[in-house]
Amino acid sequence: MIFEKWLVPDRMFGHYYEITPDMVRSMGRSVLLCDIDNTLATYDDPLPPAKLTEWIEKMRRSGISVAFVSNNNKERVELFNEPLGCVAFAEAGKPGTKFLAAACAQLGVTKEQAILLGDQLLTDCAAGKRFGIPAWIVPPIRDKKTLFFRFKRLLERPYLRRCRQIHDIKE
Ligand SMILES: [Mg+2]
């Protein structure tokens, strides 16, 4: 089923900072295309938290590039990225793949070098899978409590379960 193909992540982590340069390298890859909101920071963090800056520095020192591909607006993404200076795209329209390709192009790599990191299956994971790269997913740092967001989580549930089954992860 097409949904299963797009919505089951390749790997799940408890938090982005559990991901090490070695994990990325062991996949033969050198670029993390990251969602921002609820993956790396909350909606309430206009600037990157210190822990995230350290993590990105650690990646950089190991030759791993972190780029941002966000569906949020330009203002949000530019301000957030100002102290980091990463390759960054706003209003990316994930699950569309156009800006994943743009980020790879700007970094001068092919998609075979990239991994997608996000918190949402319907946008992030689907974008990564459609683009043909591994999709790594973390639980949202802090969910918005709106009905719409709750509905999306409900839709995601069977696919998260499927990923746990495939990789034999205990719930
Ligand atoms: Mg997100």
Image: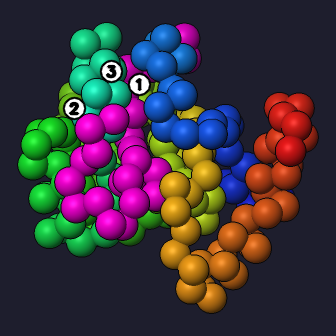
Residue lying farthest to the bottom in this orientation = 147
Quarter of the C terminus within the rendering: top right
Q: Nearer the viewer, mark 3 or mark 2?
A: 3
For the residue labelled by badge 2, is the local secondary structure a helix, a strand or a loop?
helix
Q: Residue at x 40, y 47 (%)?
A: 40
Q: Tell me if mark 2 has few (under 14), some (14-19) or many (20+) residues whose alpha carbon lies within 10 angstroms of its own.
A: some
- The answer to which of marks 1 and 2 sits earlier in the sequence is 2
Residue under label 3, please give it: 59
Residue under label 1, please give it: 113
Q: Residue at x 10, y 43 (%)?
A: 83
For the residue labelled by badge 3, is the local secondary structure a helix, a strand or a loop?
helix
Q: Residue at x 38, y 20 (%)?
A: 30
- Percent position of residue 158, x then y: 84, 61
Residue under label 2, please give it: 107
- Location of residue 76 with respect to 47 vertically, above or below: below
The quarter of the displayed image where residue 66 is located: top left
From mark 3 to mark 2, how far is it between C-alphas?
15 Å
- The answer to which of marks 3 and 1 sits earlier in the sequence is 3
The main secondary structure of the magenta stretch is loop
Q: Are marks 1 and 2 in contact (CB under 8 Å)?
A: yes
Q: Residue at x 75, y 72 (%)?
A: 155
- The answer to which of marks 3 and 2 sits earlier in the sequence is 3
Type of amino acid at the residue the image marks with label 1: Gln
